[in-house]
């Protein structure tokens, strides 16, 4: 009988674990279901888009054909009008060049005439300035002369000649007396001076002393008038030369104006043609834009249909699977309250017990939950609630036996809130933990080690997993802070007080404990600090291990293929799960129209290709695995015999505590038997030889260490165990032998001769 204690703290821990596991599983399952539903929604969206794209394409194709035809007509018309405009433009350009050339000649004539005029203009401007500077007093001064100085008189006579007056002093005085005298001079028509006047002026201009400087010495007013006369003489002479040029310029300007008029008319016609072409081009561009828009829409519809084909190809097979999976997850979510509660109870309470006793307890809990109408699965399996197949396969590869009890133990180790203390007389858990945590830097300690606390502190600080081996029935008080997880925060640091110092706690730290004691008696204080888990090997688990040993010896090629296949299938199924998660995640994170996301479609298609390859590989591997398993099953009767023998031997300590035989020692004997037994090519004969040899060899080797009085019991147990396995002895008969009938009373002693025969 196994002693195990529960306390109110155990119940409180179970409730706390239940709340934690329920939240985690609900979030996990909800997320998985939502991803499946999102994937299905995306597929439904794709279906709607495909139908819409087909309708749009059917509408767009005739419109696009019509637009293409009208655009072609418009293109031809634009080309014709452009050609016409080009011809007009050539003519206009040619004439414009000719007009420009003619205008250049006109400018040369104009510049030549202007050059001659510019020669007279300085004197004229000087004369005008001098006239403007004269005052009324200056005029009066000249007029007041009774007998003027000769130069003054000469000057006035020249003025009279230019103005058409008689050149004498009396007329000069009259002229000076006229009120508009200055206006006459300033407004004098210098461009139309009569030749007779110019001839009369020439006489005066020929005089040496008739110049402004000399005249100015006599009279300031006479100087200005002299300058005016000189300016008129110069201007008239220049104008005589410029006149023909002006006439020529005027004629040229007339011709230029006519040419410009004709040119402007042609330019106007050209602009009309160009405006017409521009309007047609604008119309053409609008038509081309509309055509391009329709083409883009058609191309988008075609692209969406193409991508839809890719997406349907990539995910079409998944639609049924996702629908089923989402329905399964819905059911799991509905039953999650009861399933997780039962799972939390298993983690809290069933760890120390054997597989049979666990099943009994769970069956009672399940029945009670149904009575209370708690939503719960009809056939509860701990591994289905708290683990994943990929995770279980990785445990099996690491050395965890594949039987139900061992897998359940792995689930307990993973999900317990306390650190696990594993009852492990056959070192199964020890081997599993070492293989599983090796890559994480596992450290090993024993309480007998002098420096185990330093190793413990280093692991806590650095986050290394730690395995405490060969534990007895008592725990070192120094481990209590670890076992109770007495963590606290200080200054943003997560700390654990270990001994007399505070140590930084790395959350990656894991602590495992194993004991080789088959039935340790742990007191209540240990039961509430650690989760005790019974890792004693089961009949089925040992049978699978021994089957591997037999096949490895008899058919090494078969076992090697099996070992490789297990790892390969585990990796492939893990990769399949990761690919499905990747696809669902990509669909969930996709924004906008999924069919417009070509990189996503390509990624999904590539994932589908990879998934198909892996599925094919997995299917082939499963077929190979089935054929290998069939071949291996032929050797199971040998493994079964070995497993039965071991459990008989393992029960011998109940007769005497000194009868201790380790599983490792038993396996060595078992493998020796396979190597030493008589060989035979006939499989049935070989199996018979192996079973007989193993039974005989094990019996003889174990009997060497038994008291004489126990040897008969040992042989009896071997015989009855084998017979019970073959159903030769029923459970009722065996139970009757051990306990007797309910109405039996003491009678006479059985026949001694019969007993001696036994």
Image (cartoon, helix red, strand yellow):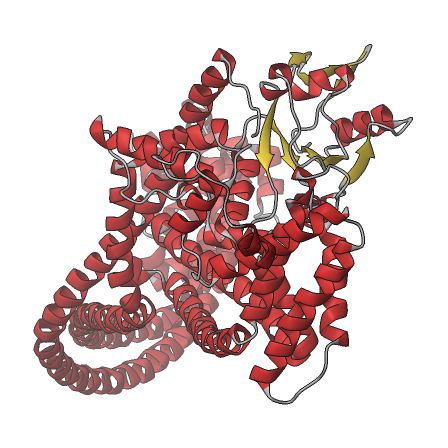
Tell me if residue 203 comes above or below residue 309 in the rendering: above
Task: Specify the farthest residue to the bottom.
Answer: 681
Query: From the viewer's perspective, is 529 left or right of 326?
Result: right
Residue that lies at the very extreme toward the right in this rendered image: 450
Residue 639 seen anywhere in this rendered image of the structure: yes
Residue 230 shows up from this direction: no
Q: Is residue 179 left or right of residue 75?
A: right
Q: Write the residue at 39% across / 64% down.
A: 604
* Depth check, front residue: 452 or 406: 406
In this rendering, is residue 664 above or below 553?
Answer: above
Q: Measured along the vertical axis of the image, is residue 312 above or below residue 333? A: below
Q: Quadrant of residue 308?
A: bottom left
Q: Quadrant of residue 174?
A: top left
Q: Is residue 622 left or right of residue 297?
A: right
User: What percent of the width, then of the height, locates residue 306?
Assistant: 28, 74
Residue 622 location, x and y as percent?
46, 73
**Which quadrant of the figure contains the N terminus?**
top right
Residue at (12% x, 73% y) in the render: 60
Q: Nearer the viewer, residue 176 or 662?
A: 662
Q: Say which residue appears at 70% left-offset and 45% top-offset.
A: 427
- Residue 199: % across, % down: 42, 62
Quarter of the image with the C terminus is bottom right
* Number of dots carrying numbers: 0
Residue 12: image location, x then y, percent: 46, 15
Residue drawn 55% across the image and 74% down it:
632
Residue closest to the eye, 672 or 316:
672
């Amino acid at each position: 009988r196994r002693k195990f204690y529960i306390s109110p703290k155990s119940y409180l821990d179970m409730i706390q674990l239940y709340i934690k596991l329920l939240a985690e599983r609900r979030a996990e399952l909800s997320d998985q279901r939502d991803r499946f539903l999102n994937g299905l929604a995306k597929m439904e969206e794709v279906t709607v888009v495909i139908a819409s794209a087909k309708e749009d394409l059917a509408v767009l194709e005739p419109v696009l054909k019509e637009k293409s035809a009208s655009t072609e007509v418009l293109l031809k018309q634009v080309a014709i009008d452009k050609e016409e405009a080009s011809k007009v433009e050539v003519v206009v350009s040619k004439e414009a060049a000719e007009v420009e050339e003619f205008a250049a000649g006109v400018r040369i004539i104009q510049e030549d005439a202007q050059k001659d005029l510019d020669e007279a203009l300085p004197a004229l401007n000087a004369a005008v300035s001098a006239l403007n500077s004269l005052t009324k007093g200056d005029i009066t001064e000249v007029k007041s002369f009774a007998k003027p100085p000769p130069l003054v008189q000469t000057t006035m006579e020249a003025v009279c000649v230019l103005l058409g007056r008689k050149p004498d002093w009396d007329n000069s005085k009259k002229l000076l007396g006229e009120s508009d005298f200055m206006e006459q001079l300033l407004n004098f028509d210098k461009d139309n001076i009569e030749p007779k006047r110019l001839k009369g002026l020439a006489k005066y201009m020929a005089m040496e002393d008739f110049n402004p400087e000399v005249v100015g010495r006599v009279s300031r007013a006479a100087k200005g008038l002299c300058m005016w006369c000189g300016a008129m003489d110069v201007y008239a002479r220049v104008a005589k030369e410029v006149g023909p040029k002006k006439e020529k310029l005027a004629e040229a300007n007339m011709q230029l104006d006519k040419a410009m008029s004709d040119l402007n008319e042609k330019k106007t016609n050209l602009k009309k043609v160009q405006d017409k072409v521009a309007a047609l081009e604008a119309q053409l561009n609008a038509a081309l834009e509309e055509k391009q828009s329709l083409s883009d829409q058609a191309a988008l519809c075609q692209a969406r249909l193409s991508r839809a084909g890719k997406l349907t190809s990539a995910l079409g097979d998944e639609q049924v699977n996702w629908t089923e999976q989402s329905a399964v997850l819905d059911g799991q979510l509905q039953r999650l309250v009861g399933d997780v509660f039962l799972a939390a109870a298993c983690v809290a309470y069933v760890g120390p017990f054997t597989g049979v006793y666990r099943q009994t307890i769970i069956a009672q809990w399940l029945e009670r939950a149904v009575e209370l109408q708690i939503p719960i699965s009809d056939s509860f399996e701990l591994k289905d609630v708290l683990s994943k197949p990929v995770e279980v396969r990785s445990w099996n590869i690491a050395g965890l036996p594949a039987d139900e009890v061992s897998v359940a133990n792995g689930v307990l180790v993973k999900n317990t809130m306390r650190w696990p203390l594993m009852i492990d007389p056959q070192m199964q858990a020890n081997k599993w933990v070492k293989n599983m945590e090796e890559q994480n830097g596992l450290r090993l300690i024993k309480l007998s080690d002098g420096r185990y606390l330093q190793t413990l502190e280093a692991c806590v600080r650095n986050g290394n997993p730690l395995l405490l081996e060969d534990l007895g029935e008592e725990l070192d008080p120094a481990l209590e802070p670890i076992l109770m997880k007495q963590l606290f925060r200080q200054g943003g640091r997560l700390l654990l007080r270990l001994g007399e110092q505070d140590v930084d706690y790395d959350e990656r730290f894991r602590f495992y404990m194993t004991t080789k004691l088959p039935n340790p008696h742990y007191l209540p204080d240990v039961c509430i600090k650690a989760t005790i888990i019974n890792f004693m090997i089961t009949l089925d688990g040992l049978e699978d291990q021994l089957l591997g040993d037999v096949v490895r010896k008899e058919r090494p090629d078969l076992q090697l293929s099996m070992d490789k296949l297990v790892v390969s299938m585990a990796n492939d199924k893990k990769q399949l799960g990761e690919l499905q998660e990747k696809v669902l995640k990509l669909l969930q994170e996709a924004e906008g129209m999924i069919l417009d996301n070509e990189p996503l479609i390509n990624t999904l298609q590539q994932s589908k290709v990879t998934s198909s390859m892996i599925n094919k590989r997995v299917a082939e591997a499963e077929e190979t695995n089935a054929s290998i398993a069939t071949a291996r099953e032929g050797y199971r009767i040998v493994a079964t015999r070995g497993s039965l023998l071991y459990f008989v031997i393992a029960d011998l300590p109940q007769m005497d505590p000194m009868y201790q035989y380790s599983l490792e020692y038993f396996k060595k004997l078992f493998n020796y038997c396979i190597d030493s037994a008589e060989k035979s090519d006939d499989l049935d004969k070989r199996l018979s030889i192996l079973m007989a040899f193993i039974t005989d060899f094990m019996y003889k080797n174990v009997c060497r260490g038994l008291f004489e009085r126990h040897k008969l019991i040992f042989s009896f147990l071997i015989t009855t165990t084998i017979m019970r396995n073959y159903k030769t002895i029923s459970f009722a008969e065996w139970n009757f032998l051990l306990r007797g009938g309910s109405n039996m009373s003491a009678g006479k002693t059985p026949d001694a001769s019969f007993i001696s025969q036994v």
